[in-house]
């Protein structure tokens, strides 16, 4: 579950009793009377309103030295661990409308508009309250047979925004847990691995003992119980989950109505996140909303929806240093300080590269020459440096001046490649980006640096004020 880098996915038990006793009269009833259809009809374009409450509690498991920001280092392999108490209380409310016609079972598309999305996350004594920006309350949801993702038609999401709303029980795939054939009370079935992965926000499910049962039908509502264990992975880290749930299905409307979900998860420490030993519980309600005030015709028609099944990039914004850039979702931020941002690239479970981002100081009247930049790079690497592979000077789509220098060397007896960049504008605003990877991983890394570099923008392109000018301005404001 992706919810837990900020949210920490996973659940608390609900007490559940499945009653499948059959009387003599039931046994004599006709098969047609016993069969129930749990199939959802093709989308009719009518929005539904979803409200959800999520509570999480447990421990984050930390590895000693795991937060190293050394550009040549991978995560520490120290087996010592520590645990930190954490809790999450979150609530969501959004209207959702299917936009596909249901003809392609391998592709689903929906648009949402969030009226409420907030959480209170407490890790040890630190409390954070992530929220969606007003401009990102409209969300597109895409699902295919391998994955599901969320994005905003109005612009890229930040990692915090994505993890706020990317929670278990994705309503776009909820009905895929149900059987496609008519079934009788007491019937049992197993959801497929790929459906469970998308339902629980996992990259993959390796094995599962999760089973569903049609427990009862009363007053036009079917009660479906789900329970079992599964093993999966997210960002290359193994996770073990124990799951229990109750789903109420409105037979007349052919629509899931209420979901009660309980999850207990134990996840190992990964390259970009802490381990987990947590439990969570969620209640989700679904109600038809034909006169949605959130998803009006104008909102739906104006939305620029994803044109492929490739998740769009996320954006990083530094208010303190006044810059932004886009990055592939396989990059994860592991450190975000005023003076340094550290990202790590995870591809198919491998830690491929690290990127350090920091503001730089240059003389706007006398830009640094490429040869001087290479000298600075060699001095920074010191004894690690072996040779330069290439160096060049160019401009970005935003008009920034770019110096690039690629070097090879050795660190901790490993062959390493460094890609150094210095970007600046005519006002003296500058940014250093350093990409570091083991040389055998260069082909796997490919050109992941190019898109990030091309996307860098300075938010306020005014000339940088001197320290004396800033002090004078602050004194005047006081």
Image (tube, rainbow, N blue to C red):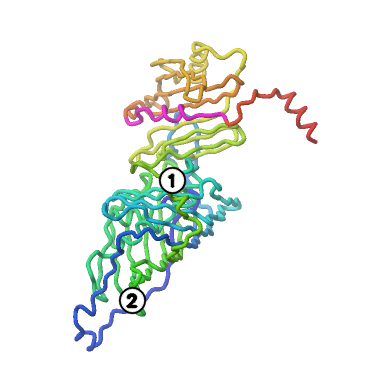
Q: Is residue 432 above or below residue 296?
A: above
Q: Is residue 220 above or below residue 115?
A: below
Q: Nearer the viewer, residue 278 or 468?
A: 468
Indicate left or right for 157 with 102 as reference: right
Instruction: State which quadrant residue 424 falls in.
Output: top right
Q: In which quarter of the image is the C terminus?
A: top right
The reply to whether dot 2 and dot 1 touch (C-beta < 8 Å) is: no
Q: Position of residue 216 (x, y in %)?
A: 32, 77
> Residue at the location (52% across, 12% down)?
369
Pointer 1: what residue? 151
Q: Position of residue 6 (x, y in %)?
A: 50, 49
Indicate left or right for 324 with 169 as reference: right
Say which of marks 2 and 1 sits in front.
1
Q: Position of residue 247 (x, y in %)?
A: 37, 68
For the image, the number of numbered tags is: 2
Is residue 448 part of the magenta span, yes or no? Answer: yes
Pointer 2: what residue? 18
**Dot 2 alpha-carbon crowd within 10 angstroms: few under 14, some 14 to 19, many 20 or more:** some
Instruction: State which quadrant residue 464 falls in.
Output: top right
Q: In this view, does 226 lie above or below 463?
A: below
SS under mark 1:
strand
**From mark 2 to mark 1, how far is it between C-alphas?**
38 Å
In the image, which disc is placed on residue 33?
none
Q: In this view, does 263 lie above or below 319?
A: below
Q: Nearer the viewer, residue 307 or 204?
A: 307
Indicate left or right for 99 with 114 as reference: left
Tell me which secondary structure the magenta stretch mostly adopts.
helix
> Residue at the location (50% across, 42% down)?
158
Q: Please report whichever mark, 2 or 1, sits nearer to the chain's N-terminal start.
A: 2
Instruction: State which quadrant residue 46 falls in.
Output: bottom left
Which segment did they paint magenta?
A: 444-458
SS under mark 2:
loop
């Amino acid at each position: 579950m992706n919810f837990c880098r900020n949210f920490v996915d996973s659940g608390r038990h609900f007490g559940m009793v499945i009653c499948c006793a059959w009387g003599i009269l039931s046994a004599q009833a006709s098969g047609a009377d016993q069969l129930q259809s749990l199939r959802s009809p093709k989308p009719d374009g009518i929005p539904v309103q979803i409200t959800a409450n999520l509570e999480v509690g447990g421990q984050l498991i930390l590895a000693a030295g795991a937060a190293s920001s050394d550009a040549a280092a991978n995560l520490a392999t120290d087996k010592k661990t520590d645990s930190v108490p954490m809790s999450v209380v979150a609530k969501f409310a959004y209207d959702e409308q299917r936009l596909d016609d249901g003809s392609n079972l391998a592709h689903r598309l929906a648009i949402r508009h969030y009226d409420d999305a907030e959480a209170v996350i407490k890790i040890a004594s630190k409390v954070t309250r992530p929220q969606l920006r007003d401009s990102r309350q409209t969300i597109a949801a895409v699902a295919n047979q391998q994955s599901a993702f969320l994005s905003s038609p109005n612009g890229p999401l930040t990692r915090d925004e994505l993890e706020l709303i990317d929670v278990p029980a994705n309503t776009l795939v909820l009905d895929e847990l149900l059987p496609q054939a008519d079934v009788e009370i007491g019937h049992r079935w197993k959801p497929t691995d790929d459906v469970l992965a998308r339902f629980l926000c996992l990259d993959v499910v390796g094995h599962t003992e999760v089973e569903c049962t049609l427990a009862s039908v009363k007053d036009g509502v079917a009660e479906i119980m789900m329970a079992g264990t599964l093993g999966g992975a997210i960002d290359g880290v193994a996770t073990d989950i124990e799951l229990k749930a109750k789903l109420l299905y409105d037979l007349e409307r052919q629509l899931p109505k209420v979901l009660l979900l309980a999850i207990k998860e134990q996840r190992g420490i990964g390259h970009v996140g802490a381990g987990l030993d947590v439990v969570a519980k969620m209640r989700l309600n679904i109600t038809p909303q034909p006169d949605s005030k959130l998803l009006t015709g104008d909102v739906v028609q104006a939305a620029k929806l994803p044109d492929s099944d490739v998740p769009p990039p996320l954006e990083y914004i530094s208010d303190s240093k006044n810059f932004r850039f886009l990055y592939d979702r396989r990059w994860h931020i592991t450190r975000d300080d005023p003076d340094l941002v550290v990202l790590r690239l995870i591809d198919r479970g491998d830690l491929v590269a690290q990127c350090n981002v920091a503001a730089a100081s240059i003389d706007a009247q006398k830009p640094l020459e490429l040869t001087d930049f290479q000298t600075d790079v060699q001095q920074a690497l010191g004894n690690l440096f072996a040779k330069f592979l290439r160096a060049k000077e160019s401009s970005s789509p935003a008009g920034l001046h770019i110096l690039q220098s690629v070097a090879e060397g050795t660190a901790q007896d490993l062959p390493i490649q460094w890609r150094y960049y210095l970007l600046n504008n005519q006002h003296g605003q500058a940014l250093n980006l350093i990409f570091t990877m083991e040389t055998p991983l260069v082909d796997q890394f490919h050109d992941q640096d190019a898109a990030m570099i091309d996307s860098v923008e300075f938010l306020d392109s005014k000339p940088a004020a001197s320290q004396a000018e800033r002090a004078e301005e602050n004194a005047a404001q006081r």
